[in-house]
Amino acid sequence: MMKTAGIWAKTGIALGAATLVGVGLSGCGLVDSIKNSTADAWSVTYAVTVTGEGTPSLPAVTFGEAKTRGEDTVTKDLPNLPLVADPATPGSSRWEKTVMVTATRPASIVATPGEGQRATCQILLDGKRQIAAVAGEPGKPVTCEATTPKFD
């Protein structure tokens, strides 16, 4: 009878230790998850205006965004994007995308206009505050880059 009790005691100790290790490991993930969910993040708008010969086109755009709060910026590629006529500037068309970028992390966009066309890019915080703007050369990609600021 003592042998059975000893086996159960050893099994209980092993299961208890395994449970503690599991809780400890998941606790680290839980802390990181809470930290990320409360991290400061900006609403970032990438805007590209295209002007030039023929029908304005935007064959390629690469931009950065965070999948969720607190995460690093990852790059996304989009081909052949639809443009909308820009009423503020006759003869130009515009594309915009609003994403999330964690505070103090990079925001960037590279836009390639159609042949003979010029692209201008902007990065806006909360749709208003410009943190980058660049006008490209005809037919060449244009790049806007900035690090998002800390929250005040």
Image: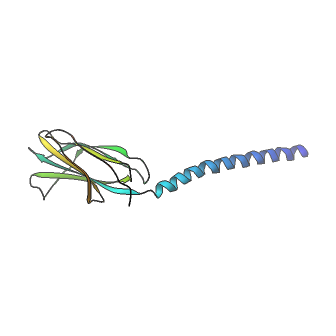
Question: Is residue 55 at all visible to an observer of this figure?
Answer: no
- Residue toward you, 56 or 72: 72
Give the residue drawn at x 55%, y 50%: 29
Q: Position of residue 73 (x, y in %)?
A: 38, 47
Q: Position of residue 49 (x, y in %)?
A: 17, 50
* Image side of residue 86 versus residue 108, left or right: left
Q: Which quadrant of the figure has residue 151?
A: bottom left
Q: How is the image coloured?
A: rainbow
147 up-or-down from 129: above or below: above
Give the residue drawn at x 38%, y 49%: 105
- Residue toward you, 93 or 141: 141
Give the residue drawn at x 27%, y 58%: 129
124 up-or-down from 59: above or below: below
Question: Is residue 15 at all visible to an observer of this figure?
Answer: yes
Report the residue that reaches farthest toward the front: 152
Q: Which quadrant of the figure has residue 14?
A: top right
* Image side of residue 126 versus residue 38, left or right: left
Report the residue that reaches farthest toward the right: 1
Q: Quadrant of the C terminus?
A: bottom left
Number of residue marks: 0
Give the residue drawn at x 27%, y 59%: 127
- Residue toward you, 142 or 75: 142
Q: Position of residue 87 (x, y in %)?
A: 13, 59
* Image side of residue 87 versus residue 108, left or right: left
- Residue toward you, 92 or 144: 144
Q: Which quadrant of the figure has residue 54?
A: top left
* Image side of residue 95 versus residue 25, left or right: left
